[in-house]
Image (cartoon, helix red, strand yellow):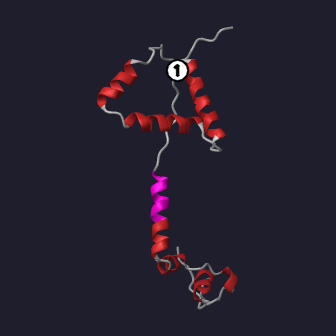
Amino acid sequence: MTTKKTGTPSAKTAARKSPVKKPSFLIKPDTKSAKKRDSSPASKKAAKKSKKESKIKVVRDSFTMPQSEYQKIADIKAICLKARMHVKKSEVLRAGLKTLAKLNAAQLKRTLRDLEKIKTGRPKKHG
């Protein structure tokens, strides 16, 4: 297999050698240097805060509780609404956990001992 060599460059090499300028609206701005220029303390603080907030993981879970205790969540939400504060069920439960965490071991043991024991799992459907 022999190929003829011609004196003219191929289309590929011609495309590489011809200096064609792109119009300014087609040139992408250099984002790396823009990031380097914006190194003010406020922007660094905002970047750290957004990274910290993105690391918080949330977990979905389900649980069983007596209807009377579940009603207490609605009661607490109603109290908050009267105080012009909108809260979610999860926020009420998280606040309760935060309060329980402040108890010493004896107080926590007493509080948990006073809870009514219930069957865990989903209730049976009546129908």
The kind of secondary structure element at disc 1 is: loop
The residue sitting at the top extreme is: 127
Residue 35 higher or lower than 125, as above or below: below
Between 5 and 93, the one lying in front of the other is 93
Q: Which residues are magenta?
A: 47-55
Q: Residue at x 65, y 39 (%)?
A: 81
Between 5 and 2, the one lying in front of the other is 5
Q: Residue at x 69, y 82 (%)?
A: 25
Q: Residue at x 45, y 74 (%)?
A: 41
Binning the other alpha carbons within 10 Å of mark 1 as few (below 14), some (14 to 19) or many (20 upward) gives few
Residue 56: x and y, percent? 46, 49
In this rendering, position of residue 112 left or right of residue 79 = left
Residue 10: x and y, percent? 60, 83
Instruction: Report the predominant secondary structure element of the magenta stretch.
Output: helix
Residue 112: x and y, percent? 39, 22
Numbered label tally: 1
Q: Quadrant of residue 70?
A: top right
Q: Is residue 60 magenta?
A: no
In this rendering, position of residue 111 left or right of residue 43 = left
Between 96 and 1, the one lying in front of the other is 96
Residue 17 higher or lower than 82, as above or below: below
In this rendering, position of residue 30 left or right of residue 101 = right
The residue sitting at the front extreme is: 83
Image quadrant in which the C terminus is located: top right
Residue placed under numbered mark 1 in the picture: 65
Residue 120 higher or lower than 96, as above or below: above
The residue type indicated by label 1 comes to Met
Q: Quadrant of residue 107?
A: top left
Q: Is residue 48 magenta?
A: yes
